Image: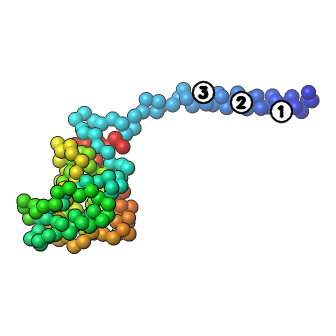
Amino acid sequence: MTLSRARALVLVALLVVAALILVLIAVLKDDQTNSSFGQQCPPGAVKVRTRPLPDTNQIKVNVFNGTSTVGLAMTVADEFRNRGFSVGKVEDAPQKYDKTAKLAFGRNEVAAAAVINSYFLVKADYAFDLKRTDDVVDVTIGAQYTKLGTKTEVNQAQAQIGNPSPPPGTCDVS
């Protein structure tokens, strides 16, 4: 073996040893070894998932008419169906609603409510119920409702809204 090859082998061996030492130091001094970022909730908080946002074909909605316009719930329900949502109940709301819309949902549908909210040109109000465990979002159409957004408007709204924040009394485990 020539002297230049011997020097090259010694240099490579030193570099390998130095790399192993650096890796060992990094592993031993790692202060995130027992980290559980995003996995623990404070005592009493309920776990919810805010991401990923579900596709429309994974979202179930009930549509209620909170206005005096006859057939509005059926019209809006048809629009939701055309956009891929699964529509359950379509009825008149027990009470009139003055704003654009109200979304009532429980802990399992936080992300779904954000998706539905992006379909309204004027954002809907949230009615989060911590005790509710079903997988349906109730949409009450109000007097200020005009129409659902176009595909482009919905995409822009979802980009602006991003992932929803967990409601009070909950924590995100996404």
Give the mark nearer the N terminus: 2 vs 1: 1
Q: Secondary structure at mark 3?
A: helix
Q: Secondary structure at mark 1?
A: helix
Tag of residue 153: none
Residue, x 51% and y 31% (percent of image)?
Answer: 30
- Mark 3 vs 2: CB contact within 8 A: no
Q: Nearer the viewer, residue 127 or 55?
A: 55
From this viewpoint, is residue 164 visible? no
Quadrant of the image containing the N terminus: top right
Image coordinates for residue 155, horizontal then vertical, percent: 38, 64
Q: Which residue is mark 3?
A: 24
Residue 26 falls in image quadrant: top right
Question: Please, which residue is most extreme toward the right here?
Answer: 2
Quadrant of the image containing the C terminus: top left
Residue 91 falls in image quadrant: bottom left
> Mark 2 packing: few (<14 Cα in 10 Å), some, or many (20+)?
few
Give amino acid for label 2.
Val
Residue 13 falls in image quadrant: top right
Tag of residue 16: 2
Calculate the distance from the C-alpha at mark 3 to the C-alpha at mark 2.
12 Å
Give amino acid for label 3.
Leu
Calculate the distance from the C-alpha at mark 2 to the C-alpha at mark 1.
12 Å
Q: Up-down: is 154 above or below 8?
A: below
Q: Which residue is mark 1?
A: 8
Q: Up-down: is 125 above or below 173?
A: below
Residue, x 22% and y 35% (percent of image)?
Answer: 44
